[in-house]
Amino acid sequence: MGAHERGYGVSEHVKYTWMKLARTGIAVAAIGSLLAGDLAVAQTVADQSVPDAGLNIPANLQIFGKLDPNIRKATAIVNGTVITQTDVDQRAALIAVANNTTIDKIPADQLDPLKVQVLRGLIDEALEIQQATTEDIKITPAEITQSLGRVAGNFGKKPEELRGYLRSVGSSERSLRGQIEGELAWNRYLQRRIQPEVNVGDDEVNAILARLKAAQGTEEYHVKEIFLRSAPENAQQVFANARQVMEQVQKGDKPFEYLASTMSDSTTRTQGGDLGWVRSSTLPDALAQAVAQMQVGQVAGPIESGNGFSIIYLVDKRQVLTADPRDSRLSLKQMTVKFAAGTTQEQAQKQAAAFGDAIKTIRGCGDVEKVAATLNAEVVNNDSVTVRDLPPQLQQIMLQLQVGQASPPFGSAQDGIRTLVVCGRDDAQSGQLPAANQVQQQLEDQRVNLRAQQKLRDLRRDAIIEYR
């Protein structure tokens, strides 16, 4: 997966997960951006101000003692739950492999910040499990094993292969089980204790619907960014650093989200640099001008913005309540031929040529299995794929195909070669206002998430944590 594709990871705390959010159409997806879009300018730079927090901090403060930045508190005891160095290392390795790299390929200057972030996530995970336990919420081994099977599929492995694979990349099944237990326990706690207390009134729903109608046809952009803060005295050096980050993005060795979470100075770093859906009027002028000229999947930068430099990635764009062909849903068959280990480039090209000739003989989806058998190819069915969810370089290709036609071969020397055959198409519907119950559900979900953050903050505040 290149840097321009959506990254997946292994933790809610890291924000780039395997599971894609289910799409409910342009209208419903637009609600989230409209909730905040009319209220404030999107924050794309770190806040330099020092608000009055009521702490009575002297203006001419003096630090007594020294903080050694080279000291890394890699382990902790959280209300009696021990987090070891091994726990941190294995979870970091899990995050690395989920983002198409390995822990040994991460530069040292990026590895330490990643492990600090991982430790924070493990602390939160321990607090979440402890809180769920106080509510007599228990996750059974069978539930975890069931989730493990789905995760194995995301790695392209069978469940029985997962343990050995995780060990080979420096992680473990135990680490992944802990991850799954934490997420299941916390979600169940929210369902039991937080969701029943959240209510959304009809007036609020009607106000959102009115704002959606007023915004119909407005262009919106899904943007991610990496922001590097600068001051006049170090602007040139920061710009040079931003150029180096841009080069890493262009190489595609690591997902954009990973680079944002480890390098960005913006408050969006905890979301992998994700600004969400925004309108150009909510962006700083320099960024607004850039996104207006970009195509989906492109990256631009460094762009001087406020008190620093931004690298931006245009994930997607749309018009509010306007039908978009990319919201068409496809029924597909994917045919894949995997290359044997040690296949040379010349051999791969010959196999790719034979594969390309074979797919030209396909006469509709009913012919796919027959052709696949001649190539020893795998066939996977998917009856509900949104064109928008495909990689940008495939979207226009799939929009031009008729039912029964196959895409040109695509793939890589590592993953093999494949084609997509269109078996059916449900065209995008004209833009319509979402139903009131859809708006209500999204508002409730947002409030549950807010209260969950507040509860986790309270748990951190009351916790007894000993770092070692």
Image: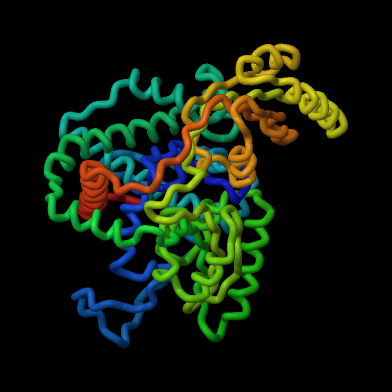
Q: Residue at x 40, y 29 (%)?
A: 177
Left-right relation of 15 to 161: left
x 55%, y 85%: residue: 233
Can residue 464 be seen from the camera position used here? no
Kindly give the residue lying farthest to the right in the view shown. 346
Query: Which of the pair 155/279 is nearer the observer?
Result: 279
Q: How many marks?
A: 0
Residue at image position (69%, 18%) is 377
Residue at the image position 28 percent from the left and 26 percent from the top = 139
Rendering colour mode: rainbow
Q: Position of residue 361 (x, y in %)?
A: 75, 20
In front of the other: 137 or 218: 218
Q: Nearer the viewer, residue 313 or 262?
A: 313
Residue that protrudes farthest toward the front in the picture: 430
Q: Is residue 324 left or right of residue 79?
A: right
- Residue 109 or 187: which is nearer the viewer? 187
Q: Quadrant for the N terminus, please.
A: top right
Task: Place residue 393 in its image quadrant.
Answer: top right
Left or right of 451, for residue 258: right
**Residue 28 x/y as whole percent:** 33, 47
Q: Is residue 332 visible?
A: yes
The x and y percentages for residue 101 are 61, 42
Residue occupying the far bottom of the picture: 60
From the top left corner, tell me how far across and down residue 292 is, in percent.
53, 66
User: Compared with residue 452, is residue 22 higher up or lower down, i.e. above or below?
Assistant: above
| 416 relative to 105, above or below | above
Rendered position, 161 above or below 180: above
